[in-house]
Image (cartoon, helix red, strand yellow):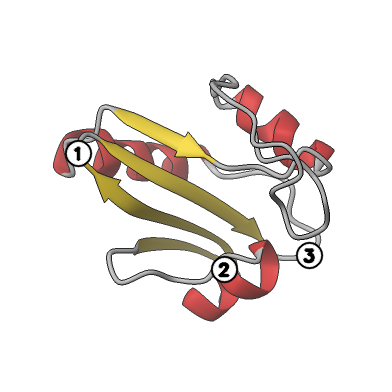
Amino acid sequence: MAGFLAAHAGVHPSADQRMLGWVEEDRLVIVVGLSGFMGKIAVIHIAFAPGWHFSPRAMLDAVFRYAFGEAKRELLIGLVNSKNDRAMRFDRHLGFTELFRLPEMHDDGGDFD
């Protein structure tokens, strides 16, 4: 799953990263990684296989149940390249709001939101 997250979202695993994968028709199609467990905060990363544009409700329920219930986090931070419109829309759809912006900090010159 770490390779999938790196290939499809450019995220490289950290020592504290926990991952959940979703398989459809015997193929891994979505990986969610939670890392950066600092105090009451964790960072969330979501990677989709080509052709996938949604997360099944059951997967999202499992991710948020783990993050807020089992891991006892109070805030999830999703770092998104501002040039990735699809990811920005997806995060807003999930209820994320922009807390801060790091100008030109993505590898391709985009902002991190």
Quadrant of the image containing the C terminus: top right
> Which sits earlier in the primary sequence, circle 3 or circle 2?
2
* Residue 75, quarter of picture: top left
Q: Earlier in the sequence, mark 2 or mark 1?
A: 2
Helix, strand or loop for disc 3:
loop
Secondary-structure class at tag 2: helix
Relative side of 63 to 48, left or right: left
User: Whole-percent x and y of residue 66?
Assistant: 26, 44
Q: Which residue is mark 2?
A: 5
Q: Amino acid at mark 2?
A: Leu
Give the crowd class for mark 3: few <14, some 14-19, many >=20 residues within 10 Å. Answer: few
Label 2 close to label 1 by CB (< 8 Å):
no
Separation of disc 3 and disc 2 at Cα?
12 Å
| Nearer to us: label 2 or label 1 | 1
For image coordinates 55% across by 80% down, the residue present is 3
For residue 77, say whether it is visible: yes
* Pointers 3 and 2 in contact (C-beta within 8 Å): no
Residue that badge 3 annotates: 50
In the rendered structure, the answer to whether residue 22 lies left or right of residue 66 reads right
Residue of label 1: 39
Most extreme residue toward the bottom is 3
- Mark 3 and mark 1: Cα distance apart in space: 34 Å
Image spot of residue 88 (x, y percent): 72, 33
